[in-house]
Image: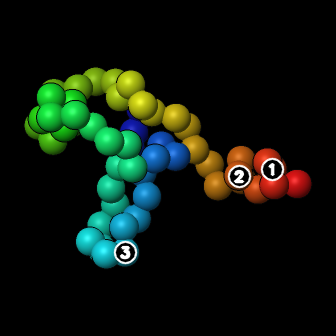
Amino acid sequence: MNCEDCMYYEYDEEYECYTCLMQLDEDEMYRFVHGKTQNCHYFKAGDEYSIVRKQN
């Protein structure tokens, strides 16, 4: 899994960087920042076309 492929990973214009929209607790954030996690429990494959298909 790669953050760039997750539907919760979006560009934040205020901070001018990509961020995860999920609210991680302190332990989850530590593992994420230090690269100590293999799999994200919140990962959901996202593609911009899936949103368009739902709107039709």
- Spatial separation of the CA atoms under disc 3 and disc 2: 21 Å
Could you tell me the amino acid type at mark 1? Arg
Could you tell me the amino acid type at mark 3? Glu
Where does label 3 land, which residue?
13
Question: What's the residue at 57%, 44% (across, down)?
Answer: 46
Earlier sequence position, callout 3 versus callout 1: 3
Helix, strand or loop at label 3? It is: loop
How many residues crowd mark 3 within 10 Å: few (<14), some (14–19), many (20+)?
A: few
> Is residue 42 something one can see in this rendering?
yes
Where's residue 24, x and y in %? 27, 37
Helix, strand or loop at label 2? It is: helix
Where does label 2 land, which residue?
51
Where's residue 36, x and y in %? 16, 27
Where does label 1 land, which residue?
53
Q: How is the image coloured?
A: rainbow
Where's residue 32, x and y in %? 21, 36
Question: What's the residue at 31%, 75% (across, down)?
Answer: 14
- Spatial separation of the CA atoms under disc 2 and disc 1: 5 Å
Could you tell me the amino acid type at mark 2? Ile
How many residues crowd mark 1 within 10 Å: few (<14), some (14–19), many (20+)?
A: few
Question: What's the residue at 37%, 75% (across, down)?
Answer: 13
The answer to whether residue 14 is above or below residue 35 is below
**Is there CB contact under 8 Å for labels 2 and 1?**
yes
The answer to whether residue 18 is above or below residue 25 is below
**Is there CB contact under 8 Å for labels 3 and 1?**
no
The N terminus: image quadrant = top left
- What count of labels does the image hold? 3
Q: Which mark is residue 9?
A: none
Earlier sequence position, callout 3 versus callout 2: 3
